[in-house]
Image (cartoon, rainbow, N blue to C red):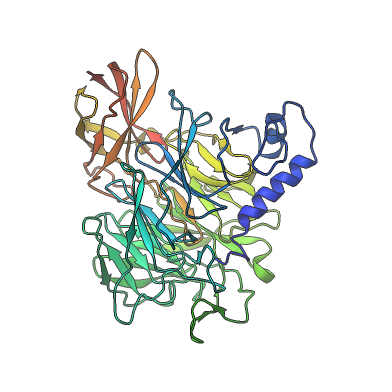
Amino acid sequence: MIRFWSKSIFAALTSSVAVAIAGCSAGGSVPSVTGVPTSDVVLSRLHGPRFTVVKQQPPTPMQIAYLMTDGSILAQSYNSWNEWFDYVPDAKGDYSDGTWTQVGSLQAGYAPDANASALMADGRLVIIGGEYNQGGPYDLQLVNLGAVYDPKTAAWTPLGHPNHPKHWRWIGDSPSSVLPDGRYLLGDKLHTWDAYLDPKSLRWHEVGDAGKADWNAEEGWTLLPDGQILTADVLDAPNSERYNPSTGTWTSAGSTVVDLRSPSPFHYCLTYGPKPKDCYLPPGEIGPAMLRPDGTVFATGSGTGPSGTGDGHTAIYKISGSSGTWTAGPDFPNDDNAGDSWAMLAPSGDVLVIGLTGALYDFNGSTFTQVGYAGGVPILLPTGQILMLGSTTTLYTPTGKPKASWAPHIKTFPSSLTPGSTYKISGTQFNGLSQAMAYGDEFQNATNYPLVRITNTKTGDVFYARTHDHSSMGVATGSLIVSTHFDVPAKIDSGASRLQVVANGIASPAVSVTVK
């Protein structure tokens, strides 16, 4: 991503919202972050009838959000990149009426934008790199700093970068993904190099990258059910590739049939360091790719016109064992595209994509239609709704329902729970069928991990028990028995309750438990 080119989607989203709102009139206005008066009536016209205005608006615009394993949302400020805020739903688990709290800031000197990131199996969040560092001296910074957030202490700990005498001097906006075994894999933006972070020691280890056709710049990674990673090349478009972590090798996954990459508008290098060689010529942009429950990956493109404008293409990858085939998908309507934008997997299996105009599109496997305007950066919630953090933060409720076979199923669980205690729970499909959140390249905020939700039968109050140490971080694990640990909140209603495991916004059938 290039901030002053396509990462300005946030500005485009908020400005399109503001312009549309300014052109409407309605009573009962509520304040927005941008100062433009809004109302539920106006927003329903602008966004669509399935949007609800969040009652407690965030204290600042946010540029990315993460679903934590206790059901809270951790979000980074768009205005001050070292500031972070926590959002929790109300007592009934309603995310339209929650509470914002500022939490720990990053270490001095590290205020990144467009970095790599992931929630690890132990429940901590890792961020590394950044295309920009607030206040940096160059066109780009390609930061090689990092940090780990511990939700138990609400504090950040500095994290080093992969250490090699000649490699990994820069990280920037690199692709990354947590592998099924819990290792966090990172690609070097400027090269083909790969390295993984050991989540226990927090040490980096370089791994093989043989066969990579081009550098990792501007590419997104999609975790597949067999543990391999699929990417659509940007520099080497329309080629695609699969990475096998067990062998450390890349192989071609064939042509995407249509070109998903936008042409680069740059004909000169962007500086990111003090030496003349420290310059970067962007190869273009691409849209997000999403694994669907039917075993296909829906990949979206950036604009094919000058500077990434115009209708973007899409392509569909049908997985067949360790290989697959590509076919062309429907083009974006309305002269729109998704270069450096977000996609989400709705519980129904539809893929929701935000276009650069702010329009929200729904792909149901055959048709691709606009369903509203997003107006902000998204995160998939355990309720199956999507929080859209923008000039006016809203909650989107997708249409449709998941198939029963897609839900997690609990096999073993404790029937009696003591507040403040930790328990183990096991079952199938605790990690969902997909990573469920995707961006064009960086800004990874996948949700393929289990949450435990406890609802008191008498009061109806909802409590999320923080989960950690998941046995797998894979996707679509099928009949494999997987497990996680959960911490019962110290303050929780006692008595008969219903417990569910939630993954990708899809809840398991409830089991009965008693809270002492």
Left or right of 409, for residue 79: right
Question: Observer-nearest residue: 236 or 380?
Answer: 380
Look at the picture and state if 371 lies above or below 336.
Answer: above
Look at the picture and state if 415 lies above or below 159.
Answer: above
Let me know if residue 483 appears in the view: yes
Name the image quarter holding the C terminus.
Answer: top left
Name the residue rendered at 45%, 55% in the picture.
297
Name the image quarter holding the N terminus.
Answer: bottom right
Question: Observer-nearest residue: 68 or 350?
Answer: 68
- In this view, the residue farthest toward the front is 108
- In this view, the residue farthest toward the bottom is 276
Name the residue rendered at 75%, 43% in the picture.
20
Look at the picture and state if 73 lies above or below 305.
Answer: above
Q: How far across and how far down the image is residue 170, in percent? A: 41, 73
In which quarter of the view is residue 163 placed?
bottom left
In which quarter of the view is residue 407 placed?
top left
Q: How far across and how far down the image is residue 94, in percent? A: 48, 27
